[in-house]
Amino acid sequence: MKKNKLLFISGLLLLMAGMASCTKDLDAVVPQDTISKDQALSDPNAARTLYHGVYGLTRSYAGTFFQLGEMRSDLWVDGLFTESVDGGLQNLYRHNISALNVPFSNWGGFYNLIYNYNNVIKIIPQTTLPAAEKNRILAEVYGLRAYVYYTMLRTWGNVPLNTEPVEAINNAAETYKRRTGVDTVMTQVKADIEESLKLFGSSNTLPTGKRVYWSRVATQILKGDVYLWSGTHMGGGTADFTTAKTALQEIRNLQGATLDLQANYADVFDPTKKTNNKEIIFAINYELQQSQMGMFGSFLVNSIQANTLSFAQAPTPTVSSVYPYVNGANRVGFNQTMLTRLTSGTPDQRINYSFKTMYSTAPPHAVRGVMLTKYIGTTAGTSQIYNNDFPIYRYADVLLLLAEAKAKLGEDPSAEINAVRLRAYGAGYTPHTNAGVTANMNAILEEYLREFIAEGKRWWALRRAGDTYVYANVNPTYFSASTAAKFLLPLSLTMLNNDPLLVQTAGY
């Protein structure tokens, strides 16, 4: 690696073309594939390019964020899908994981992200950018780095901790790095959160336009998320739950015209309603002629089957008549038990919008599978455009995380649970009443199941709730107390062979 050379991704500036809030800044940015350190230090536009680039790079990991937080849960399972199974995703929800069957090698590639975050944190203070702009950029990137390290901590436990950019490598041995203890990694995550909050200052103003930049509100939600985890799994207990509640209550108190639940659940994800979407706090951006959300291809249906499947237990409407340009696969789905659980009872607008059940067009019109429609996007000519944004945090997160903090403190979480239920079911909803920690947590987890389908949240919600909730919900054939080592993922043999300082995850 050449000294003073910063890695950058070709075409990253396309990320910004659809972001109304940054048009003026981008007019001055010169597209480049690589940026030298000297350029970034002397040219403010090059420094801005470096900053904007980390968002494009973060977008390239959306599929990894999704799989890590979604596919090991109880939601997507063997059962109702029309084509051959997606073997990689099946290994995740079956927890078919071992030292020889490692789902994410090379730490999921996250150190490429960390490398770029570290570069920005190191370089931006030395640039000629205005002080206020420097502080905002640093505040955002500290928040992003905390989020990624938190994701890695939850996935692997002990991970190498690196907070300095790598400017020169003279030999392979310089790249070797031991796994850092999980307590130390968590300390760094919390330190990054506090640095982010300090640099943002006291303003909780959300980005104007599309909310695809990190903000102080996002950092506060992350703080609540992190302290709930450390309170549950790392001995923090009541003190950490209280810290989480305080951070989340601050955001709850902001509820109003610019931050609230959307009355219509579909409006949260509508690609034509991204601008100043009051429920979105931070989302990964997708736009036509930039990048489309391709990670859900196995949750759709192919064009041939679309003509022989219906969205009702009748010959019509066929899938192709409703979505004539959708063409993917249908390799992951629900079993009938989960489908019945989600679709029975009082109509839930979250379910109706998140997926559609597909039936055979021939009698007896048997269930054939489910099609994920939450991210179906828009059409352009004769093409389907998958231009929904992928939410990382939204206001519903605030409500359910705050409910969790209250439940774990022995307080009444009914107000937050019922706010989510009211939007889902309407005025005739069945309100939750305070019923003790276990019952409250189960009610919260039921809302997580329904609220965040395909948003990469369900596995983390079960894990954060506590091990007993995982065992109670995930198929014991695939995961139980006897296989608890699989809470964390193993390292591949290639990783271990390439770095003699690494040791395998315990239990593998």
Image (spheres, rainbow, N blue to C red):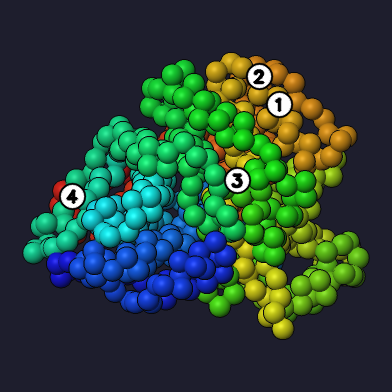
Disc 3 element: strand
The residue that label 3 is drawn on is 394
Mark sitting earlier along the chain (3/2): 3
Q: Residue at x 12, y 63 (%)?
A: 169
Query: CA separation, marks 1 and 3?
Result: 18 Å
The residue labelled by disc 2 is 412
Q: CA distance from mark 3 to mark 2?
A: 22 Å
Based on the displayed image, in which of its 4 quarters is residue 375 positioned? bottom right
Image mark for residue 415: 1
Mark 1 nearby-residue class (10 Å; few <14, some 14–19, many ≥20)? some
Circle 4: element type: loop
Q: Is residue 335 above or below residue 487?
A: below
What type is the residue that disc 3 sits on? Arg
Q: Quick check: 86 left or right of 311?
A: left
> In the figure, residue 302 lies in which quadrant?
bottom right
N-term-proximal mark, 4 vs 1: 4
Q: Which mark is residue 177?
A: 4
Q: Residues within 10 Å of mark 4 (few under 14, many from 20)?
A: some
Label 1 vs 3, first from the N-terminus: 3
Write the residue at 38% across / 50% down: 132
Quick check: marks 4 and 1 in contact, CB under 8 Å? no
Q: In this rendered view, identify the residue nearer to me: 477 or 378.
A: 378
Crowd band around label 3 with a 10 angstrom C-alpha radius: few (<14), some (14–19), many (20+)? many
Residue 26 as seen in the image, left or right of residue 267: left
Measure how far apart labels 4 and 1 are at the Cα level. 47 Å
User: What amino acid type is highlighted by mark number 2?
Assistant: Asp
Q: Secondary structure at mark 1?
A: helix
The answer to whether mark 1 and mark 3 are in CB contact below 8 A is no
